[in-house]
Amino acid sequence: TKWVYRFGAEGNEGRSDMRDLLGGKGANLGEMAQIGLPVPPGFTLTTEVCTAFYRNERQYPDGLHQQVADALAAVERATGLGFGDPERPLLVSVRSGARVSMPGMMDTVLNLGLNDTTVEGLAHGSQDPRFAWDSYRRFVQMFASVVLGVSHHNFEEIIDDAKTEHGVSDDTELSAAHWQEVVAAYKELVERETGAAFPQDPHDQLWAAIGAVFGSWMNPRANTYRRLHDIPADWGTAVNVQAMVFGNMGEDCATGVCFTRDPSTGENIFYGEYLINAQGEDVVAGIRTPQPMAEGRAKPGELSMERRLPGAYGELLAVRERLERHYRDMQDIEFTVQQNRLYVLQTRTGKRTTAAALRIAIEMAQAGMITEEEALTRIQPTSLDQLLHPALDPKAERHAIARGLPASPGAAGGAIYFSADEVEARAAKDEATILVRIETSPEDVHGMHAARGVLTTRGGMTSHAAVVARGMGRVCVAGAGGIRIDYAAQTLTAGGVTLKAGDWITLDGSTGEVFAGAVPTIEPNLSGDFATLMGWADKVRRLKVRANAETPTDAATAARFGAEGIGLCRTEHMFFAPERIGAVRRMIMAGDATSRARAIETLLPFQRADFAALFRIMGDRPVTIRLLDPPLHEFLPHTDEEMAEVAEGLGQTLASIKERYEALAESNPMLGHRGCRLGITFPEIYRMQARAVFEAAAEVAAETGRPVRPEIMIPLVGSARELEITRAEIEKVAAETAPKDGSAAVEYSVGTMIELPRAAMVADAIAAEADFFSFGTNDLTQTTFGISRDDAGTFLQQYIETGVLPKDPFVTLDRDGVGALVRIAADKGRSTRPDIKLGICGEHGGDPSSIEFCEMLGLDYVSCSPFRVPIARLAAAQAAL
Ligand code: ADP
Ligand code: MG
Ligand code: MG
């Protein structure tokens, strides 16, 4: 088996389409070398080595050692250096690289191959002992912390001591001799902490580092990241070994990170940060302040790379152009300049905000780089959520206490907490929280996920906090240097204000401002790029998108987001309103039909007004009204006071009311007296609701002169007969309320929810009575699995974590079980009524994977909550492509 692939010398064996085997980093290093970009030579140990390693009790496969030795020899030939050579030592980096980038999840070791002998050779060869000793101390520190597990703050203390001792404030002021002392202290520390001397043999170093990368694939933070991002553990990581180039050799050297377009806004400008005389992670570590790339972006006091290193900058501009054309997407590039020579160390598809993703996709399509269809596939539907979120109300009063970098846009307020665990615990109790840290690391990812926003006081636009927050769509203000955080006291001090844990702040991730207290927010702008993309999506999608909405506010939001109708109006909330519930209770508790009818009559005007309001907003778009569904139980009076009220209203004794209460109480209300069962046993209810629908529809149609399209939906039907009975009642009411002039302004239909397995199995018979089916996949999932959503909390999470179930079936439709029933019902329904209209109205209606399934079944529409309508429009378009 071939376990090792070479790049940059003697043939490039990797290509960008080999990312499953070589990881993203390795595949792209091969591709870049192939198209002639300056990539230092190296080789990749495949992800299959990782999988084999774990399958085989952490043993490497046969032949690996020889293949690594051969590839290393090729790098030696290409560079003219020798690994472990005392005169001309070859140094390498050892880098992890999974199929999908897992930023910061695994660690890199740089300058590997240095020891007490080779450091002298490096010093001699470069005629700069300071550089050699700086590299050596970096290596000891990285190797010790990444490979040997020595905590890195120990090393920082040694540097701090050295700086104090020599009276300097900046690392760059330490001389060769100083670094030499630091190295000696480092090695002592390692020996003390690990009980063994720092390894001197470069081959031992190399294999230990390779082992550490493979080992890190299963470390807890990598596991967390994979869980959050649905990355299977058996993908494995690759390891890249690559000749070092040095950005820390002097003033004509640098290292940096850049994006081919602005990852926050998507603007087509060259964007990034660099540091002179620096190496590796210095740029993101926040020790020195990185400088901007482009002169146009430099603020007073900043020195752009364009001005400082014009030659290398020019080369980099060409690389930017080349890589973007080649990959046809925005790239995130890592580079190093060694003595004015540019080297490219990594390229990958750049992470970006949703706003940037839209702008980039649209501008690339408009420039002919990609098609409109490709542009649509570039946007993750659920990410649109970010755009639908509020911004600060410009008119609101506010008091900025600090300003940082606008690292991830949107506005969010919450109570501040200083640890990821605290944030997670508070957020679990529905508290709005902001995670406040000096800087974040992969250990904080779960807190960032739980928080509404993230605030850091250190780090740039490419710092860990910024990159991760943008990826998650969390609001983030990074590097707010004016804020002081005291972890011990749990306080934050800025602008003369001291806030403690639990106090509120508001972040504006679009400007970088931090405000004390809660600042009101306003709705987002849905024109511009958003409207363009939605327009493209609407051109290609086949599925219609409706919203689940009951209130005029929700209906208006849905309409604004482009809903093509209401797919589910739950009428029960109309019963619970305080001024109505009394009448509902009297209706249920009444012994005889007359007092029941009287009670229900008082509800009619309320319902009529509710429906009329919805019809006015939706115009001639269809509105599906589901008649009363929840268990009778929920409407019963519970307290003595409520019972007394009902007794008085009905002129009965309290005792007789209590007796009736006992008679109607249920032990399993969700499987009890609800849905059409209620409609059949208390026919007055559905009759009243139908009357309210028809009268409201006629009223609005008369007002507007346009047809109104109510679709009356019967819940919880399990047999055709149930629908036949309820439908007949509704039709009777329709005839009674029909306008005398015979105008057909009300175009109603009657259909049913399919939410019981039995209904799915007899859907052909039910369809004979139904103009439409709406799959109520929430209940259908409950009844198919026999799991009550309200009680699932105690075990479902564990089921998902341990893989008993692949996904939460209440979030993503279970295609094999629930989906099979939907398919059967759709087929059977069409067999007896070929033109039956089919839709879905559970939570799944807003879930992209479930929408894809609906497209596969050829349903007519999906219906979801108003804020999910844009997501569903895009997901439906992607499903149709
Ligand atoms: P990550 O995946 O966390 O970005 P990388 O493997 O890309 O880790 O390494 C981090 C940084 O180390 C790179 O951005 C680069 O600056 C530096 N680096 C890696 N390999 C080399 C090399 N061969 N020469 C010089 N610097 C390197
Ligand atoms: Mg790293
Ligand atoms: Mg990198």
Image (cartoon, grey):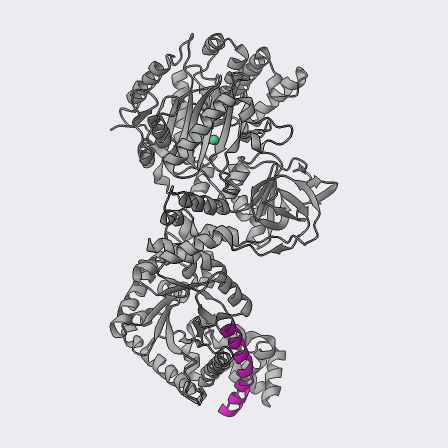
Instruction: Name the quadrant containing residue 52.
Output: top left
| Residue 27 placement (x, y as % from top left) | 35, 32
Task: Please tell me which residue lies in front, 742 or 811.
Answer: 742
Task: Please tell me which residue lies in front, 274 or 596.
Answer: 274
Q: Can residue 762 be seen in this view?
A: no
Left or right? Give the position of 529 relative to 504.
Answer: left
In this rendering, is residue 582 above or below 99? below
| Residue 56 placement (x, y as % from top left) | 31, 32
Identify the residue at image location x=36%, y=22%.
Answer: 42
| Residue 626 placement (x, y as % from top left) | 44, 74
Q: In which quarter of the image is the N terminus?
A: top left
In this rendering, is residue 362 above or below 80? below
Task: Please tell me which residue lies in front, 275 or 112.
Answer: 275
| Residue 702 placement (x, y as % from top left) | 49, 81
Q: Is residue 39 visible?
A: yes
Q: In the image, is residue 695 part of the stretch drawn in magenta?
A: no
In this rendering, is residue 357 above or below 395? above
Indicate the quadrant of ligand 3 in the picture. Answer: top left
**Residues in magenta?**
591-616
Identify the residue at image location x=55%, y=82%.
Answer: 605
> Number of labelled discs?
0
Magenta stretch prevailing secondary structure: helix
**Residue sitting at the far front:** 367
**Residue sitting at the far right:** 496
